[in-house]
Image: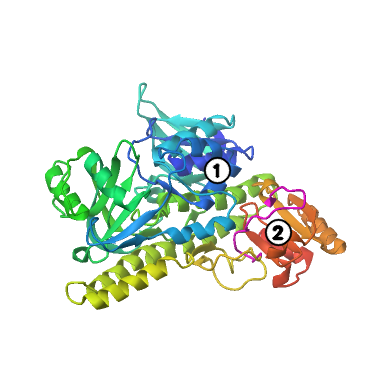
């Protein structure tokens, strides 16, 4: 008889293991099935956002993440965008505007290779007794019924035995070639930009010295008219060792043996020749895909199984971890008895539009916009026009970052029209469907010290006590876990511009009073999809 779990996670990469942490911290019995015992050593997924570091804070391993970084202490996380090649006179810092986001998040961003992040989250998950790992097991089938999910897997080590486990729900975190998608008939669609790309990992002291001209920078993005907006880019893995990765469009017939041809492409991008010791050479396609749904009854998908894209802008791993946080509290609500099937449906409702816009409008659209810009402006044809257009790019790069994940208009937020997506502005006033910015309470603590991933929080700032009592009563009637924080509407808290804020377990605002009053029963019914 198959051993029974509450949630089975297919895939033990950083997204799957982080989901195990999120669910395990709620006391949910979790199984994780993963083909590989060792983490890979390819330095992908390096840029971890402010928001992602908040996740690690709540999962109890943010300090470990920061200690794992390869960059020297204090080394700045930033990049430059360069025209034509890395020796060009035309370049500017391309992501300094992201530093403007610091006041809107509780944690600062970080940079380290994904394999080090994986080591940290594996260690954290290993501390949770209710999380069981089945390393070196390949999932063969994911089959569900009205009552649960059965997963068949085969051991990759002696004895080569087949096994089955049963679970109430399953989550496929098994990448772009997801067996979960295949067995559940979940299709993916998107834009193929038509380029074959290389990924190299290499060491070069010469390139390390040459790129010092930009100061403390970690990424070097190159726009070459030849590639119509597809980036060539170098990224630092370490500093003293002179270890880099490199992405660029290449000829479709290249193989991992063609290091000389790839090195020539690297020289083109660098604008100089240099010696390089290759550690890895692989290939991928410049394409975006998003699953049609993130849920099929008792089976969910997250991370690359749900959405994949080129490594542009650091959206991959960060998006997958946001999937985890959104799904985690909703599954937790089911097992705690106050959630509903309708609440689980909101996982697709909220998360799919976010990545659909990220992939199609931000990434694919960005490549297409850069391609059009390169076709229109060239210093050899018209230097005056080019420099005017280049100056405009520099000015645009200093403007506030326009990418703001939000669930405005979601069926489980109250008081805001619209639809979930990434188009928004970072603001301190509390807004339904938007991430709550941190603030200092009267006792000197931060509001984030008091938020919990397993409950709603009501922040009451000089609020009417009868109104607060009514919300508490409505939550109690529905067994919704709710913490109430009373404070004054003074000091740092004035920026919220309201006296009552209902905060979801994922730190997004479910309702802010300034956006409209609502009956307490209707409010609590709506935020858990019972309305």
Q: Is residue 58 left or right of residue 199?
A: right
Q: Which residues are magenta?
A: 430-447
In this picture the colour scheme is: rainbow
Q: Residues within 10 Å of mark 2 (few under 14, many from 20)?
A: few
Marking on residue 492: 2
The reply to whether residue 2 is visible in this rendering is: no
Question: Of tags 2 and 1, which is closer to the observer?
Answer: 2
- Which image quadrant: the C terminus? bottom right
For mark 1, give the secondary structure.
helix
Which residue occupies the foreground of this view, 41 or 377? 377
| Of the image marks 2 and 1, the number of the one nearer the N terminus | 1
Q: Nearer the viewer, residue 176 or 284?
A: 284
Where's residue 498, x and y in %? 73, 66
Disc 2 from disc 1: Cα separation: 25 Å
Q: Secondary structure at mark 2?
A: helix
> Depth check: 268 or 37 in front?
268
User: Residue 208: percent from the left, percent from the top?
Assistant: 27, 43
Mark linked to residue 83? none
Q: Is residue 139 above or below residue 83?
A: above
Location of mark 1 (residue) = 56
């Amino acid at each position: 008889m198959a051993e029974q779990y509450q949630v089975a996670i297919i895939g033990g990469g950083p997204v799957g293991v982080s989901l195990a942490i999120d669910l395990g911290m709620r006391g949910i019995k979790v199984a994780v099935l993963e083909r590989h015992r060792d983490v890979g050593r390819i330095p992908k997924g390096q840029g971890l956002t402010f928001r992602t570091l908040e996740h690690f804070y709540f999962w109890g391993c943010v300090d470990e993440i920061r200690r794992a970084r390869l960059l020297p202490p204090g080394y700045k996380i930033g990049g430059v965008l360069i025209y034509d090649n890395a020796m060009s006179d035309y370049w500017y810092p391309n992501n300094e505007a992201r530093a403007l986001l610091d006041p809107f998040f509780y944690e600062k961003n970080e940079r380290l290779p994904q394999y080090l992040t994986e080591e940290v989250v594996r260690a954290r998950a290993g501390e949770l007794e209710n999380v069981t790992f089945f390393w070196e097991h390949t999932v063969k089938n994911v089959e569900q019924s009205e009552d649960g999910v059965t997963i068949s897997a085969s051991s990759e080590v002696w004895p080569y035995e087949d096994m089955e486990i049963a679970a109430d729900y399953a989550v496929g975190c098994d990448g772009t070639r997801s067996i979960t998608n295949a067995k559940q008939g979940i299709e993916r669609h998107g834009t193929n930009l038509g380029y074959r790309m290389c990924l190299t990992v290499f060491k070069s002291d010469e390139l390390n010295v040459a790129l010092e001209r930009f100061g403390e920078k970690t990424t070097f993005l190159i726009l070459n008219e030849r590639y119509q907006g597809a980036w060539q880019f170098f990224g630092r893995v370490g500093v003293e060792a002179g270890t880099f990765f490199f992405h660029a469009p290449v000829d479709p017939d290249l193989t991992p043996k063609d290091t000389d041809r790839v090195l020539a492409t690297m020289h083109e991008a660098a604008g100089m020749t240099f010696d390089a010791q290759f550690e890895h050479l692989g290939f991928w396609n410049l394409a975006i895909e998003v699953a049609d749904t993130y849920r099929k009854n008792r089976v969910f998908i997250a991370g690359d199984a749900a959405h994949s894209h080129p490594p542009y802008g650091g959206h991959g791993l960060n998006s997958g971890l946001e999937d985890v946080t959104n799904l985690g509290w909703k599954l937790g609500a089911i097992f705690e008895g106050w959630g509903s099937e309708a609440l689980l449906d909101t996982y697709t409702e909220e998360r799919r539009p976010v990545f659909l816009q990220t992939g199609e409008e931000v990434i694919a659209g960005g490549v297409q916009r850069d391609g059009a810009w390169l076709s229109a402006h060239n210093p050899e044809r018209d230097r005056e026009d080019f420099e005017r257009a280049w100056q405009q790019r520099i000015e645009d790069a200093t403007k506030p970052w326009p990418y703001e994940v939000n669930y405005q208009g979601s069926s489980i937020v109250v008081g805001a029209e619209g639809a979930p997506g990434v188009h928004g502005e970072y603001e301190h006033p509390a807004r339904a469907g938007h991430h709550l910015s941190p603030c200092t309470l009267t006792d000197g603590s931060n509001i984030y010290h008091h938020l919990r991933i397993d409950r709603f929080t009501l922040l009451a700032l000089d609020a009417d006590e009868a109104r607060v009592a009514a919300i508490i009563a409505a939550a109690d009637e529905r067994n919704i876990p709710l913490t109430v924080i009373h404070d004054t509407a003074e000091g740092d808290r004035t920026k919220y511009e309201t006296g009552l804020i209902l905060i979801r377990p994922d730190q997004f605002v479910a309702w802010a009073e300034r956006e409209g009053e609502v009956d307490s029963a209707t409010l609590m019914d709506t935020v858990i999809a019972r309305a």
